[in-house]
Amino acid sequence: MIKGFIKKIGAANFVLLIVVLSIIVVSEYIYIGGNKLDAIFIGLWAPTILGFMIYLKKSK
């Protein structure tokens, strides 16, 4: 199941999706820890990376 998903979207995109998910988890952890502004700053990296992925995919 995961191999088919990786084959469908590509290995590089799969790695970037894992990075985005880890950024979201780290941001939530920091937010719960009480450092709200840092968590929001880190949380904004995820949509930025996803937007960059979409831009690169569309520019081919």
Image (cartoon, grey):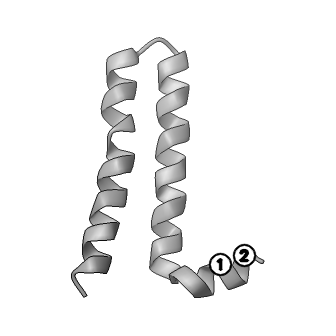
Residue matched to label 2:
2
Q: Residue furthest left?
A: 59
Locate residue 10 relative to residue 58 in the image: left or right. Answer: right
* Residue 50 % position (x, y): 37, 58
Q: Looking at the rendering, which quadrant does residue 29 occupy?
A: top right
Question: Dividing the image into 4 quarters, which one contains the C terminus?
Answer: bottom left
**Which SS class for mark 1?**
helix
48 in relation to 6, above or below: above
* Residue 15 % position (x, y): 50, 69
Amino acid on which disc 2 is placed = Ile
**CB atoms of marks 1 and 2 within 8 Å:** yes
Real-space Cα separation, disc 1 to disc 2, in angstroms:
5 Å
Amino acid on which disc 1 is placed = Phe
Q: Residue at x 50, y 41 (%)?
A: 24
Q: Looking at the rendering, which quadrant does residue 43 occupy?
A: top left
Residue matched to label 1:
5
Locate residue 14 relative to residue 56 in the image: left or right. Answer: right
